[in-house]
Amino acid sequence: MDGDRAGDYRILHEADLRDYLAGLPDIAALLGGEPASWAITEVGDGNLNLVFIVKGARDGIAVKQALPYVRLVGESWPLPLSRAHYEYLALSRQAQLAPGLVPAVLHHHDALALTVMELLEPHIIMRKGLVGARQYPRFVDDVTTFMAMTLFFTSDLAVAAAAKKEGIAAFAGNHALCKITEDLIFTDPYRIAEQNRWTAPYLDGLAAQLRDDMELHVAVCRLKLKFMASPEALLHGDLHTGSIMVTDNETRVIDPEFAFYGPMGFDVGAVLANLLMAYFASAGHERAAGERSAFEGWVLETVDKVWNEFARKFLDLWRAEATGDAYPPSLFTGDRGAARLEAERQAYMQRLFTDAVGFAAAKIIRRIFGLAHNIDFELIEDPRRRAISEARAVRLARKMMVDAPTFRTIADVTGAARNLRDWQPELSG
Amino acid sequence: MDGDRAGDYRILHEADLRDYLAGLPDIAALLGGEPASWAITEVGDGNLNLVFIVKGARDGIAVKQALPYVRLVGESWPLPLSRAHYEYLALSRQAQLAPGLVPAVLHHHDALALTVMELLEPHIIMRKGLVGARQYPRFVDDVTTFMAMTLFFTSDLAVAAAAKKEGIAAFAGNHALCKITEDLIFTDPYRIAEQNRWTAPYLDGLAAQLRDDMELHVAVCRLKLKFMASPEALLHGDLHTGSIMVTDNETRVIDPEFAFYGPMGFDVGAVLANLLMAYFASAGHERAAGERSAFEGWVLETVDKVWNEFARKFLDLWRAEATGDAYPPSLFTGDRGAARLEAERQAYMQRLFTDAVGFAAAKIIRRIFGLAHNIDFELIEDPRRRAISEARAVRLARKMMVDAPTFRTIADVTGAARNLRDWQPELSG
């Protein structure tokens, strides 16, 4: 699907949705009972779409419908419905590659930009749990499996070049969603932009510093260029802790509507960044000194493990399933060849790590100075305490972006974060 | 066009071609006279296609028709006709961006995979002129304009991200031609492959060394990965001196059927590599010591100028026409911003230069150990002298590929070439 079939599209309000679902025998049977008895609630708290939970006598479902504009902003900011098509395409691919780690799709209608999925219950958005200092024991294993499988198996290491180019082309039309990232993450936070906001007045000075920091601007422009022109693998494209639903025993990655072929470090960096923000926000949420220290220790340990486990799984896949056109095994025969290829695998992961460090930094800075903030920081009620947490995160992010290669291991990142735990920034105002 | 419309395709032999052209009023008028009087000659000496020259009473034309297989190898190696579509697409874009530097297209028929172009006369294939020690005074200015204009104006520096992604998708279907490059340039010369050949027995030892050189294999794999997954700009994709037709006063770049979005250094490196091969071949063509020294001096001076002029023109375009989404001017305001952006432009060109050095090396090695050789070396009749010229080129290429960043300027490359002018390699056999 290249364009939107606007003629067939209509926004499904509750009554329309009830009729529509009643007309789908499998869905109606799954819900159970009379359509009139189904409980329909609009719960969308994301930035872009309508999300309904529908509960019948037997079971429940989630229904997501794209709006032709950005929900967070309104009709003044149109956004193509085709994103629902790309989300469906990505969900289908991810379900093949990482079974059980994305919601099952029960129905999709391209023209309505509507997807019916299994209801994730009692899962909650991970970010909410992190604000409440909850620890998720399955998270590391699940999210690293998700990333290793979806990134490796859509990369040139696993896919023949022709199929890879077809994949890139299949997602090329999702450029309006990419443009949101290009603008809101890689550009606007670093210049005067109407939609920017930050914890004023305390971060006014820091915001001005960022707008004046040319080393940072060069670094973010290099990341932006990499985002635009390095189709290494099929990315989720928005892999923050608000796109992950969890219980103690399960993890589901949702909302891949930003999916496209881009640099792997962008997805990996998104996970690292959002955990680091949970860490820096934690001090702002504590009511008694040290009450969240176990959680904070768990978060940093999780950051370490996310990278290390991802790298381990990705490397294992590369050693076992290198069916792509990159690094052909026939060029690395014999013991010397095997040893040299293994050294190159390690070097490749080091380059990917440097990318992830830089992209993580960009994800942090945009949440503090750009349009879309996150509840990790937003729910810190006292703006001064919020600003202190945010300033600590920005201090680390600035270094991660400008000096990414100096972070050789993930322990360098978490060590730097730990050192900033109680750092007292100078605030404005 | 995604696939081939094989149903409408037929190979046009001379009589069919005469009828076909007679049915095109504009073409028939341009040729002039009775169709029966037109002189039709098949002149294709490339590796892939049929090429006819048709001369009428008034004027002449060139007609290129793709065959459904690789001409050099035969029907056992099928190749999609769609390459004619991509060639036409690329020619059209190049004609807009670099007017006067590509042949004018007079007619195109997608299903027949056939393109009618202006007859380039008295132009000759530049490579033939170089073998004859001819100098081309227009070449530097024209080829650097061609590269600067086509690469800059299809890059993220000039094009909005959405249009760029559409461009990438428009050429993604040309993957069979990319695959030829991936196999024949970046893979086969470094392993045992049936189609490889070299000047035996003299280069047997060197061929074995290359197959055993793991540093070189890692370097070529990095280049291959960059070729596959770095859509920086719309490349010509096969920009050697056999794809350039020249007179003293004119330059035309032909045959962009390998066009796709790839790394800019691949096109730039192709030009540098083919000039360097002309330089190293020259010693093999001389009948008296020093008789081609003026030519050789001109070739190396041309290598220097190709890079320096290309870089100058590309940078000038960037300073004046940066309408793309990369490096937004709004992030580099004021004197400090302007200075920092200018420094980054220089750093960007340095990265591009390193890429070009590496890709140039790959282009040299494939012409000496792979399937497709070139007449620069092939026309050296004495195989021993040929092998000596080739071994000198390979010695430089090996260093350029493995140690690309140590070549800081183009003078480092031409200086190294000059130092190898009379180097005596150890030959096998």
Image: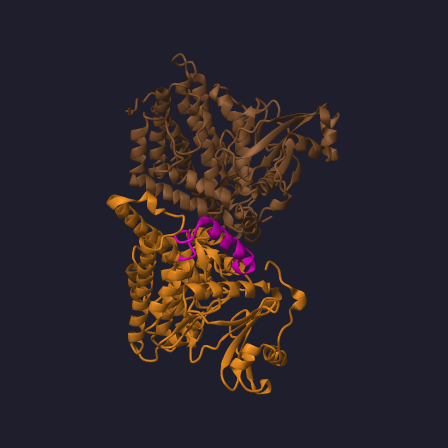
Chain colours: A orange, B brown
Reply above or below: B412 against B283: below
Whether A176 is among the magenta residues is yes
Q: Does the magenta segment cover residue A59?
A: no
Residue nearest the observer in this picture, A176 or B78 = B78
Based on the displayed image, in which of its 4 quarters is residue A145 positioned? bottom left
- Quadrant containing the C terminus of chain B in the rendered view: top left
Q: Is residue A33 above or below residue B45?
A: below
Where residue A190 appears, x then y in whole percent? 48, 57
A248 w.r.t. B16: above or below: below
B182 left or right, relative to A421: right
Residue A314 showing in the rendered view: yes
The single residue placed furthest to the top in the displayed view is: B288
Using the rendered view, name the quadrant where residue A249 is placed.
bottom left
Name the foreground residue: B339 vs A295.
Answer: A295
Q: Determine the residue positioned at 40% across, 14% down.
A: B290
Q: Position of residue B158 (x, y in %)?
A: 55, 46
**Is residue A377 rendered to the left or right of residue B80?**
left
Q: Magenta: predominant secondary structure element?
A: helix
Compared to A292, does A259 lie above or below?
Answer: above
Residue sitting at the far left: A335
Q: Residue B36 versus residue B401: which sits nearer the camera?
A: B36
Q: Nearer the viewer, residue A180 or A341?
A: A341
Q: Which residues are magenta?
A: A153-178
Q: Whole-percent x and y of residue A24?
A: 58, 76
User: Residue A63: where, in percent of width, then height?
Assistant: 54, 75
